[in-house]
Image (cartoon, coloured by chain):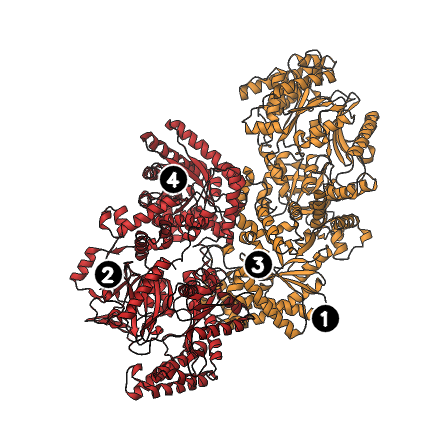
Chain colours: A orange, B red
Amino acid sequence: MQRFVYFFGANEADGSAAMREILGGKGANLAEMSRIGLPIPAGFTITTEVCAYFTSHGGQYPHGLQAAVLSNLRKVEQVMGKGFGESENPLLVSVRSGARVSMPGMMDSVLNIGLNDQTVKGLAKGGNERFAYDCYRRLVQMYGDVVLGLKPEDDTAPDPFETIISAKKQEKGVSKDTELDVEDLRELVAKFKELIQREKNVIFPEDPYDQLWGAVDAVFKSWNNRRAIEYRRINDIPHEWGTAVNVQSMVFGNLGRESGTGVAFTRNPATGENIFYGEYLLNAQGEDVVAGIRTPQPINDAQKGDSNLKSLEEEMSDAYKQLLDVRENLETHFKDMQDIEFTIENGHLWVLQTRAGKRTGLAALKIAFDMFHQGLIDRETVLLRIDPEQLNHILRPVFDAKGKDKAKAENRVVAVGLNAGPGAASGKVVFSAAQVKDYVESGEPVILVREETSPEDVGGMSLAEGILTARGGLTSHAALVARQLGKVCVVGCEVLDISYENKQMVVGEHVIKQEDFISIDGTTGEVILGHVDTVKSEIERVVIENSLKPEESVIYPLYKMVMDWSDQCRRLKVRANADQPDQARTALAFGAQGIGLCRTEHMFFGEDRINKVRQMILAETPAEKRAALAKIEPLQREDFKEILRVMAGKPVTIRLLDPPLHEFLPKGDEGAEAVAREIGVSKEEVIAKTAALEEMNPMLGNRGCRLGITHPEIYDMQVKAIIEAASELKTEGVEVLPEIMIPLVGDARELSFIRERANEVASRVMYEKKVHVDYLIGTMIEIPRACVTADEVAKVAEFFSFGTNDLTQMTYGLSRDDAGPVIRKYIDLGIVRKNPFGSLDKTGVGGLMAIAVKKAREIRPGIKLGICGEHGGEPSSIIFCDDIELDYVSCSPYRIPVARLAAARATLLKAGTYVGSQVG
Amino acid sequence: MQRFVYFFGANEADGSAAMREILGGKGANLAEMSRIGLPIPAGFTITTEVCAYFTSHGGQYPHGLQAAVLSNLRKVEQVMGKGFGESENPLLVSVRSGARVSMPGMMDSVLNIGLNDQTVKGLAKGGNERFAYDCYRRLVQMYGDVVLGLKPEDDTAPDPFETIISAKKQEKGVSKDTELDVEDLRELVAKFKELIQREKNVIFPEDPYDQLWGAVDAVFKSWNNRRAIEYRRINDIPHEWGTAVNVQSMVFGNLGRESGTGVAFTRNPATGENIFYGEYLLNAQGEDVVAGIRTPQPINDAQKGDSNLKSLEEEMSDAYKQLLDVRENLETHFKDMQDIEFTIENGHLWVLQTRAGKRTGLAALKIAFDMFHQGLIDRETVLLRIDPEQLNHILRPVFDAKGKDKAKAENRVVAVGLNAGPGAASGKVVFSAAQVKDYVESGEPVILVREETSPEDVGGMSLAEGILTARGGLTSHAALVARQLGKVCVVGCEVLDISYENKQMVVGEHVIKQEDFISIDGTTGEVILGHVDTVKSEIERVVIENSLKPEESVIYPLYKMVMDWSDQCRRLKVRANADQPDQARTALAFGAQGIGLCRTEHMFFGEDRINKVRQMILAETPAEKRAALAKIEPLQREDFKEILRVMAGKPVTIRLLDPPLHEFLPKGDEGAEAVAREIGVSKEEVIAKTAALEEMNPMLGNRGCRLGITHPEIYDMQVKAIIEAASELKTEGVEVLPEIMIPLVGDARELSFIRERANEVASRVMYEKKVHVDYLIGTMIEIPRACVTADEVAKVAEFFSFGTNDLTQMTYGLSRDDAGPVIRKYIDLGIVRKNPFGSLDKTGVGGLMAIAVKKAREIRPGIKLGICGEHGGEPSSIIFCDDIELDYVSCSPYRIPVARLAAARATLLKAGTYVGSQVG
C-alpha cells in the first residue's frame, strides 16, 4: 500500500532529505534533521501525493489516510509525552504547508491546534494562564482567517479579528497586545467565536480532531490560492507538484523572557560573507518574525552594528551556543548555506525548519567558492550551486562612484538601510504593489516602497526595478523575494516614515511623494533622491572597458573562476548572436567562440542604405535591381569585413536577408511621399509597390530563402559581399571562417537552388581575387517541414542552426506578435507552464529538433549543429540542447556567461554528478 | 556496366513494355510490339538515364554511349538491309523523344537523318528523285528549325524556311508544295543551307553521324524547353524523369499513291464506342497528320459520315486489313484502347508507335466496362483504368434541352463539328491562346477558337472553358489535349472561316468577333451563338433531383457500376465536408458515409445572426456575452438538428468556432458606423474593439481552440446547441452520432480544458432533457505540435481529423493567402512539383501525419482517424491516406464520387493487383 504519512522525531524518521518530491522541502529536511540528532519537535508529514489526490478528487482524501494520521499522532504523543485533546497535558500541533521548493508565505498555516475550552485549562496549568489564553486566542483567529476564510482577500482591508483586538486595547487604554491580561484574552476568544458564528454561520470546532482536519484541508487548498498560483507562474514551478502538509508538535517562544523565536542564515545571504546572520524576537511565536510586525533583534553581536537592540548572544548565551552548534552541524551535513527557523522554549532550543537559503548572485558565487576552499564541496558542486541567471545579476550596471559622490555632496543620500539585493535601481516611487503594473506598462521604471512586503505584493515586486522597505532584516519577506527574483533591494530602512494614505514618505526633512524619482543602491543600502548615473558592472569594466584591473574587482575573480571551471567542464560551445562589429567585440570579451547568427537585415536599415534598398525594391527591371544592389554591396562588404576581422580565427555564421521586402517600405501616405521624393519616383509608385507586397500573414509570407529564390539578385549580392570580404582579409593574412546561412528553408530543393548560385558567385569572386576561402553553406532550421525532412536537407547543408523563435511559432501555429493574450491565459490556467518563446518547449518544438538531429546525423554524421534562437541563452533550453547533442548554442553577447555556466551544468547534470540539495 | 541503348526490330527487342521508366512510353511499346511480331521499323532507344546524365552534366554524355549507339546502328543496318551514310542504299533514321508518359508535341523530332548531297542520290535511285529531294528538303528544314534553333519562339512569326518555300511557289505561280518539281526542291535545299549559314554561321553538316548526334542533343535538350516545362507543370509530371530518345529507321508514307501515313484509336476516344477510329493522309509524312496542316481522310467507311473524303478502307483495302489485324493484336495484347501511328510504304504497313489512348471521362468508363464485358480485363483493372478526376468531368453541367431547342428555333446553332470533349461550355470568343489568361484573370469565361491548336497553346487551353477548332479530327492536337485536360472541345468544324488578323470568324452569314459570346456542346459538336442555359449532369439528375430515371441515362449505369465496385473494394470510408442541410443531402446522394467536417462559423455569418455575434464580441461583461450568445443558441441548435436529421444513423463531425473574432467585425469606418447603428453601441466602440482584436498574423493568432479557452462561453453555447439538438432528435427516435471537433489543438492540455467544460455542459443538457446521447469529443490535427505530441493528445481525444489545409500552412510556414507568387516560382523552377495546398506533400506534411498516426494508435489503438482538409478529395492524397491507414477521408460533396473511386484504387495499388499499362 502507498504510504501517505511519514513520521519524524526523537532522532529517527521515516523519510529523509532525498524525499523532497513527496515530503516537500520542509518535511524532507525535518526528517533529515531528526536523523542527525538535531532538536526538532516530533511530527509527521502528509505527502504531496495526497495533495494531488485531494485536488483531483474535489477535496476527498485517499482511503487509509485517516488511520495513518491517527497512528502517527499517537507516536507524536508518545515522544512528546503529551496527549492530543487531553485536558491535563495537552499536545498542541501546527499544520504547515511544505512544497518541493520553498514558496515562502504563499500558502497557509494554522498553529496551536488542539486547544479548546477544556485543554486551554490544562495548558494553563503550567502556571502561565495568560500564555495559554494567548495561544487560544491565536488559534481561533488563525482558524477563522485561514480555515474559515475570514481573512480579507484585499490586503489593505483590516483583519476583522485585529479590529476586535484594537477595540479592546482602546477600551483599556493600552497600545500593545502584551498589555492585555488573561481576562481580556478570554473575552477576545469569546468575541472571536461570536464573529465566526456571525460571519460564517459555523461554530468554532471544539473537537481537536475537527480542528486538525479543517487545518489540513485549508493548507492543501491553499496550494491553489491566487497568490500561490502567481508565485508559481513567476518562479516557474509546475502546478501539478502539490504541497505536503507537516503536522508538528508546538513548541513555544512566547513562554516568557526565557523564550523566543527567530530565523537565521548560516552565512550572509546578501553578500555571502561567512558570518552567522539572524534575527529573533523574545517571547514571541514564529509568525511574528516572518510577518515583520515587530522589529526583530540581531542574533549576535557581530551584526549589531550601531543598533542598540540586544542580541541573542547577550540575552541567552546558552541558547545561542546551542544555535551555533546547530549551524555547524547543518553546514557540515547539508554542505550548503542554510536558512533555519528556531524556537527557544524556556531556554531549550528547538529547530523548526532548515532549507538551502536563497541568496543573491554575489552571495551564490562567494558562498560556493568559500565552501570549496573549506573543502566542503567540489568544483562540480560549485557550478551546480550557482543559478546561471544569477550571473546575469552581477552583470548589471552599478551606480557610478562620481555620481554617488555628487549625490552625497548635494545631500541627496537621505537614508541607509540593509543591502538586501545588490545593484543599482532608479525609478518613480510607488507605494502600492498593485499599481506597479500600470507604471511599468506605460514604460516608467518603478521603485516599490513599502512598510514591509507581504506575499500579495510578489506580482508588483517582480515588475519593479527595485524594492525599498522600512522594516525587516535580511530574513524579511522583501529581502527573501528580492534575492529570489534578483531584484535590487534595500530593507529595514527605519528612518522612512511611510504614509500609504497620503501616498508619501517623510525622511528627515524630505517629503517624498508617489512618482518622485529616487535611486537605491542595493550594494550599500543607500537611498538617494533623484537620479544617479550608472556605470557598467565590475565585470564589464574588467573584460570590456579595461577600466578596472582584475585585482581591484571584488566580483571579477569569482566570475573568472566560474567561467574557467565551466569552460573546462562543458561540451557545448557557446557563440554569440551579433550583427555589428562592436557587438562582436563584446561577445568576444564574454568568451564567445564564434558568431552563431549575424543578421544582415539590420545592415539594410542603416540611414545610408535604406533608400538604396528601396530603390532596389521599386526597380522595374532586373538590371535596375542589380544596379541598386551594386550600390549596397560595398557597404555590406565593409560590414562583413569588420566582423570577420574582429572574429579572426573563429567561425562567423552570416544569415542572408530574411524579412519580407515590405518591411523596408514606408508605412502610410506621408512615408510614401518622403521616400518618393528621396529616391525620385512617384508617390503612387511607392504606394502601389507597398500594396502589392502587402501580406495577410507576413510571418508566413515571402521571406527568408523564398526571397532568395524569387529575387535571386539579393542573395547574389550578399554572397558576393561575404566572399569578397573574406578574400580580402585572407589576402591580408587574417584567418576567416565564414558560414553562409540560408534562412527559412522548408525543402532541400530550396537550399540546393540557392547553394548552387552561391557557389557560382563565390567561385567567381575567388577566381577574381586569386585566393581560396573556406566557407560553409548551411541553413537555419525554423520550419517544421525542414525538421521532418532533415535527412534530405542535410544532403545539401553543411550545418544546421535551429532558429527556435520561428520554429516555435510554426510548431505552435502561434505568432509571437499575437500570442500575448493567449499565452497569458494559458499560463494562468496551467495549460502551458512556461512561455514557449522564453523557454524551449522540449516536447513539441524539441521533439521536432530531436527528429531533425537524428535524421541529419544519419545522412551527414559530421554535420555542425547549433541553435541561434533566443532559447540559446536560456539555461533550461541549453540543457535540452546538450541532451540532443548540438555542437553549440548561440545567444546575445550579454547572455554568454550565463550560457557558458548553463552548458557546464548541462554536462554535470547529464553525468549525474549532482547529488546535493539544490538552491531554489 | 549500365546499359544505355536498347535495340528493337525483326520480332525481337532488348526491352519490353514494362521498361517504360528507362525507355519511355514510346520506346517500351516499340520493344513490346517487336516482341509480339508487329511490323515495326528497326531502331533503338537511348534511355532516360542518359537524359538525366546529359542534363546534370551540362550536355555531356556518359562514357560508352557512343560505342553503344554505333553497334546498335550496325544492327539496324543489318535488319533493314541498308547502310547509314552509304550512297547506294542509304539508311535514313528518325530521332524522336519519348518520355515515361506521353507529352504530345511538346518535344522535338528530326526525320530523314542520313541524307546529304551524296546519299540523296542513292535514295533517288529507287526511281523517285522528287521524293528524295523532298526528304532532303525536309531534313535541312527540320534540322535548321530544331537543332540549330531557327524556328521562331513566337508561334505567330513565320518559319524562315516556309517563307522561302512560299516565295518559290509564288515565283512559279503554284499554290501547293506538291507542285514543286525536283529542280525546285534542289534549289530549296541550297537556299535552306544558305539561310542556315547566314543566320547561324554554321554549315549544315553533311556527315550523317554529325546529323545524328546533333539531333539526339536537340531532343534531349527539348525536355527542358519552355512549353515542355509548362506541360509538365500542368500535367504534374516530375521534371527529373527525363525523356528517352528513339532512333528508328525511316519508312515513307510519301512515296506516292500507294503510300500514306495516319493515326488511329482502336476505339472512339471521345465516346468510347467500340469503333475503329483514325485519320490518314495519302502520300505524306507523319508530321503532316499530327500538325493538322492538311485535312486528313477517315480510315474507314464507318466514320465517313457525310464527308466526301475517301477512306483508307476504300483506297488501300489490303493495307486497311493489315491495320485491322494490328488493332486486334494490340487490344488483345495490351488489353486497353490504343492510340497508334502507322505508315504505309508502297502498300506495306509499318506501325511506328502505340500507346494507351487518352480518352474523355465518358469514354474511359465506357471502354473499361466494354472490355470487362469482352472478358479482356477484370473488375479491378476497370477501376484502375478510370482516372478519378474523370468522374468529375461527367458530373459537369450539360446544356438544357429546352435551351438547346430555343437556340435551334432561333437559328443560333450555326455549326456542328466533331464532339471531341463532352460537356457544355459558354464564354467569350478569344482567338489567341496567349490572351486567354488576361480574360480569365479578370473573371471572364473564354472559348478559345483556333484554326488548329499547337503545343504552344496548351497554357491557354488549360485556362479556357472550352476549345473550338476549324480543322483536325479526334486525333488532332486540340482533341488530344482536351481529352487529357478534361476540357469541353469541338474540333474539325470546317465551316468556320477564321481570320486571326481581323480577330473574327465568319460562319455562313454570321460574323463572330473576339469577345462575342458563344456556347459549344462537346457532347454533340454543336456551336451556338450566345448563351445557353445548363442543367445538372445526368448523374445529378438521377441521384439528387430524381428528374431523370436511371434507365433513361447513358452515363448513370456506368457511374453506378464504378461506384458499386469501388465501394466493394475500398477500405477507406468517405465522408463529406458539409455545413448546411442541403449540402448534407447532396453528400448523401453521392454516397457520403457521414459528415467529416461541419464548419459552424458559416452559421455565424447568416444575416439573422451576424449582429448577435457582434453584440457578443462587443459585450463588456461575461454576462452580456452570455446574453448575446443565448440569442444565437436556438438558431445554432436548429442548424444542427437539421443536419443531424438528414444524416440520421451516420456520424456528423461538428467543428466548433474556428476563425478569429475580428473576422466578424466590419472593415473600415463606414462598416463600423453601420454596425454601431444596428446594434446600438457607439461607432468608436466598434472601431476600438476592431483595433484591439487586430492581429499581425491572423493565421497564427487567437482562433480555434484558443478562442474556446480565452472566450469559453462561445464553445459552451455551441456544445449546448449540439447536445440539445441531438437530445431532441433522439427523443423523436432519430439515431444521432454527433462528434464534437475542437480545432487548432497544439497541446493536449488545451483539449483537456475544453473537453472537461464540454462534458459538463453536455451532462447538464442530457440531465435536463432526460436522455442520453452518445457523442465523441476529438480534435482537428492541424498544428505541427499536435502531430509531434499526438500520444499526449490521443489520451484526451476520441478521434483525430487531419486539417491538412492549415497543417500544410504551418508545416511549410507558408500562408495560403500569400503563397501564390512563391509557389508559382517554385513550380517553374522545379523546387516543388505540385502545389502542396492542392496535393498533399507526402514527405513533409505527410511525414508529420504518419508520426501522429503512429503515436496516437500506440496510446489509443481504436482511435478514429480521418482527414478533412481539401486533400481529402484529391486522388494522390487519398492514396497516401490509405497508406497511413486513416479510417476515412472527408471532402466536398461533389468530390465524393472521385474519392470513392480513388479510395478503391488505393486499395488495389496497395495490393499490387495492377500490372497493366496505365492511362495517361
Horizontal side of B159 relative to A388 (left or right) equals left
> In the image as oriented, which residue stretches furthest toward the left?
B409
Looking at the image, can residue A528 be seen? no
Amino acid beneath label 2? Thr
For mark 4, name the chain.
Answer: B
Check chain identity for marks 4 and 2: say if they share one. Answer: yes
Labels 4 and 2: the sequence-earlier one: 2
Amino acid beneath label 4? Val
Compare residues B269 and A248 and report the one nearer the observer. Answer: B269
Q: Helix, strand or loop at disc 2?
A: loop
For mark 2, name the chain.
Answer: B
Horizontal side of A63 relative to A681 (left or right) equals right
Rounded to the nearest angstrom, the CA distance separating label 3 from label 1 is 30 Å
Amino acid beneath label 3? Pro
Rounded to the nearest angstrom, the CA distance separating label 2 from label 1 is 80 Å
For mark 1, name the chain.
Answer: A
Of circles 1 and 4, which is in front? Answer: 4
Query: Is A797 located above or below residue A91 in the figure?
Result: below
Mark number, residue A743: 3
Horizontal side of B572 relative to A114 (left or right) equals left
Q: Which residue is mark 1?
A: A732
Horizontal side of A556 relative to B186 (left or right) equals right
Looking at the image, can residue B831 be seen? yes
Of circles 4 and 2, which is in front? Answer: 2
Check chain identity for marks 3 and 4: say if they share one. Answer: no
Q: Which residue is mark 4?
A: B652
Q: Helix, strand or loop at disc 1?
A: helix
